[in-house]
Amino acid sequence: MLKKYLFLFLIPLFFTACSYTTNPLVNPNIENIQSDDELTNLLLNHYYEWKGVKYKYGGNSKKGIDCSAFIQKTYITKLNVKIPRTTYYQSRVGKSVAKINAKAGDLVFFKTGKNSRHVGIYLDDGKFMHVSKKKGVIISSLDNIYFKKHFWKIQRVLEEN
């Protein structure tokens, strides 16, 4: 009987050990995250689960997703934090921070047209993850010429420890 339970316990560990570099918590309590590095790793784990998923306006699944749905899904599944569905309302959540003070988990916003906006999640070292219309879920740099030109603001949604 003990062998049966041990086997059932070890099989999931075998598969998760190959796919995660950190503890694969599904809905961690944000207070349990001790450092920006842990948060960055948690966000990167989510990125690798979604990497390359194609952009689809209004999409909310791995068949296709838009930028604000990806951000909302990341926050609820990895951080257990509810945020609004649209970029417009996401841009009104939290508090504004200077680009130089950006931390893992901050929302990065861009004005991409007269009335259009784009959002991503800051990771570290000037990098953020988002959904590109051409490449799907990717990681980009704030130093990219396009994103430098269209940068709008950064909002901190997660409370600091």
Image (cartoon, grey):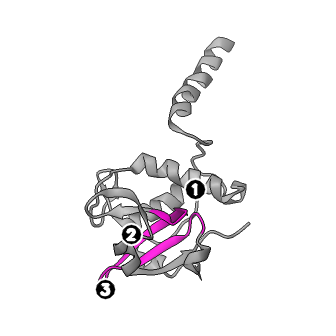
Observer-side mark, 2 or 3, equals: 2
Q: Residues within 10 Å of mark 3 (few under 14, many from 20)?
A: few
- Say what secondary structure mark 1 lies in: helix
- Say what secondary structure mark 2 lies in: loop
Alpha carbon separation for disc pair 3 and 1: 31 Å
Observer-side mark, 3 or 1, equals: 1
Q: Residue at x 40, y 50 (%)?
A: 50
Dot 1 or dot 2: first in sequence order is: 1
Q: Is residue 120 magenta?
A: yes
Which residue type does callout 2 highlight? Asn
Observer-side mark, 1 or 2, equals: 2
Which x, y percent locates residue 86? 40, 74
Q: Residue at x 49, y 58 (%)?
A: 74
Along the line of sight, which residue is nearer the eye, 153 or 148? 148
Which x, y percent locates residue 133? 27, 64
Q: Residue at x 51, y 29 (%)?
A: 15
- Say what secondary structure mark 3 lies in: loop
Numbered range of the magenta stretch: 103-128
Which residue type does callout 1 highlight? Thr
Q: Residue at x 48, y 51 (%)?
A: 46
Q: Give the labeled residue for mark 3.
A: 115
Dot 2 or dot 3: first in sequence order is: 3
Alpha carbon separation for disc pair 2 and 3: 22 Å
Which x, y percent locates residue 142? 45, 70
Q: Give the labeled residue for mark 2.
A: 144
Dot 3 or dot 1: first in sequence order is: 1
